[in-house]
Amino acid sequence: MKVNRPFRRDSGPRTTDARHRRPRTPEPPGPPPRRRRLLLTSATVVAAVLVAVLALRNATGPEPSAMGEECRPTALLEPPCGAWFGAFVPHERADLEDKVKAYEERVGRKLDIVYTYHDMSLPEGTRREGQLLTPEEQRVGDDRMLLLSWESKWWGGTKRQQPTWKEIAAGELDASVIDVQARRIKEYGERTGKKVFLSFDLEMDTRTPGNGTPAEYVAAYRHIHDRFRELGVDTVVWTWIITGYLNHADLFERMYPGDAYVDWIGYNQYNYYRCHATDWLTFEQTQTASHDWIREHISDDKPLMLSEFGSAADPARPERQAEWYAQVPRVLKDLEGVKAALQWNYRDPGPHCDLALAGDAAWESLGGAVADPYLNQPPPK
């Protein structure tokens, strides 16, 4: 089966409490169905956004003139003086560049990080879903950073073709998958001097027991990491991404590969609202509890990434989504150690689950938010 979208969203309908999302319910391998994003426009929304954008002008943050060499990113791509802004932009394989540029035009700035998704399939005919750093990604990466999400799946493949953590840890995929992609990343780094963020099995807390045990996940992660090192790949920034759903706190602790194997920690939290029949949550409410728990129980010094964040719209109050995004820079500055925030501009499966920006007002609000100096840092050299 040909997979047209090099990204994942293997979630199913679920409910949440008032603060944190429920885990995804595994579905058969394959891409999500195509959905239309909602379009909301109204004079009321635009007026609300103008107020929000004016408020943002007073937001504090480092002035561009104050950013010298001391604000240049570290070797692990950590911006010392603020945070990166990135996004997942829905695309087909061939139109990634066009979709990214269209997103940037609407939001009014270039993305620091572009987020894409891959499986561990073997090349079959024209499929490249298992190929890290496609030609399209490399062109996008000319003047942006890349976050590659690598999943232990074969999208559209048979049950027998689905990789397991135990097989990965045992080296059974080294020759056919792991080594092949490691060498691609090594060549890219040697040729361009660029590093990439790489995540193995994001939201792994939703993948057990289907893919294996927590211990098997840790072994698989460490094997990939060590195999890359054995092959001389030193241009990967290892990024461990969880849901952030705190009912999985025990799993997070059991599935953490260890400080020596992780450079950044990411978590994915949203304002789902009607998507999962929850209360409306502010940006601050969606992020703070998970952030604080990670700092207390996993790491108090690793750079953190809001690897997916976003909000559903409220049809009864169209201005609400715009107001939600207007709060991002203020809250972000209070989330100690959060050095990147990536907006998820797509949808989850299920009714009312469109998490994309819903209209001009929301786009203008996000554009105003990400114009804040805190989210405009000097790029890597």
Image (cartoon, grey):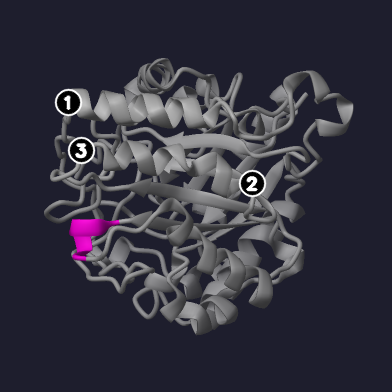
Q: Is residue 302 visible?
A: yes
**How far apart are labels 1 and 3 at the CA level?**
8 Å
Q: Please tell me which residue is depicted at 23% across the width and 44% down the height of the picture.
A: 313
Disc 2 on helix, strand or loop?
A: loop
Q: Please tell me which residue is depicted at 16% across the width and 35% down the height of the picture.
A: 38
Q: Horizontal and vertical percent for residue 267? A: 51, 59
Q: What secondary structure characterizes most of the magenta part? A: helix
Residue wearing tag 1: 42
Q: Horizontal and vertical percent for residue 225? A: 67, 59
Q: Is residue 346 left or right of residue 370?
A: left
Which quadrant is the C terminus positioned in?
top right
Quadrant location of residue 207? bottom left
State yes or no: discs 1 and 3 in contact (Cβ < 8 Å): yes
Task: Between residue 377 and residue 151, name the one nearer to us.
Answer: 377
Residue wearing tag 3: 318
Earlier-in-chain disc, 1 versus 3 = 1
Badge 1 amino acid: Ser
Disc 1 on helix, strand or loop?
A: loop
Task: Between residue 335 and residue 227, name the one nearer to us.
Answer: 335
Badge 3 amino acid: Pro
Q: Is residue 107 left or right of residue 240?
A: left
